[in-house]
Amino acid sequence: MESISERIASEIYDKSYAIIDDFISEELRVSLLKEQSELLEAGKFRIAAVGKGEKKQVRTEIRNDQVLWIDSDNLNKFERQYWSKVEEIRKAINQRCYLGLKSFEAHFARYPIGSFYVRHMDQFQQVLYRLVTVIIYLNDSWEEEDEGTLRMYLPQEDGSEKILDVLPKGGRLVVFMSGEIPHEVMPTKKERISITGWLRDID
Ligand SMILES: O=C(O)CCC(=O)C(=O)O
Ligand SMILES: [Fe+2]
């Protein structure tokens, strides 16, 4: 039987994205959410920046979430559980799509009420090594009226785009090709928590 990772890899191969509900257990989701709120309390989060290197700057008209990078050399028990599940995805995508993915980098992201991230692409000049975006949502509950959807602009064969709105439901995993799918976070009406990461072709 096909594993979840193999299913993700074949969906990435076929349509450049995959959405998997209940990718992590409730126990793991709650533990990661709790860790996030403790780190927030401790003042560890920073206003997210855009760009990289010398071009890096805070531009709150583009994005106004807060992030905290996870140190992949010092993972705690729960982070390690998530990393090992992503590792399965990395291997499966490499087998199916020959992308040569080597490593994973990720940060917690917190979107306070009213915050957003305008349309963008995750792979650009400074970060061409970001090949696949992997997002896990940690929210306790999410309804249509909470808004804050991930809006994906799926390129169509005829050159047009198809909009796909994804609710950031807890336990839901979204994977997509970083250089192929423009996307945005619509303004949220409820605090919105996730871990966003990228599979890379560098160590
Ligand atoms: O949280 C999301 O749904 C998307 C976040 C995002 O696009 C990013 O951090 O680059
Ligand atoms: Fe993004």
Image (spheres, rainbow, N blue to C red):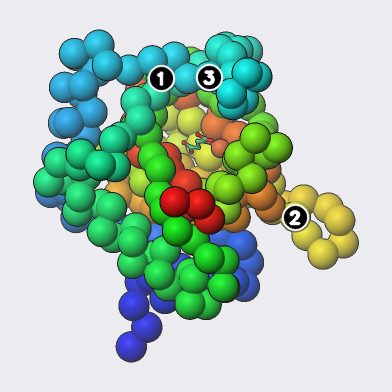
Q: Specify few, some or many for label 3: CA neighbours under 10 Å numbering under 14, 14-19, or 20 or more.
A: some
Element on which disc 1 rests: strand
Element on which disc 3 rests: loop
Q: Residue furthest right?
A: 158
Q: In which quarter of the image is residue 24?
A: bottom left
The one of 186 and 35 positioned closer to us in this rendering? 35
Q: Residue 155 carries which label?
A: 2
Of the numbered discs 2 and 3, the one sitting upstream in the chain is: 3
Mark nearest the camera among 2 and 3 is 3
Element on which disc 2 rests: strand
Q: Which amino acid does label 3 sit on?
A: Ala
Pointer 1: what residue? 66
- Position of the N terminus, as image quadrant, is bottom left
Q: Quadrant of residue 109?
A: top left
Rounded to the nearest whole Å, what is the CA distance between mark 1 and mark 2?
A: 29 Å
Question: Number of marks in the image?
Answer: 3
**In the rendered view, would you say 143 is above or below 15?**
above
Of the numbered discs 3 and 1, the one sitting upstream in the chain is: 3
Report if the beta carbon of the residue with label 3 is closer than 8 angstroms to ligand 1.
no
Q: Which mark is residue 49?
A: 3
Q: Residue 193: in sight, yes or no?
A: yes
- Residue at 28% x, 52% y: name it: 83
Instruction: Report the image quarter containing ligand 2.
Output: top right
Q: Which amino acid does label 2 sit on?
A: Pro
- Residue at 65% x, 35% y: name it: 126
Q: Which residue lies furthest to the front in this view?
A: 203
Q: In this view, does 96 lie to the left or right of 32?
A: right
Q: Where is residue 198 in the image (x, y as percent from the top left)?
A: 47, 47
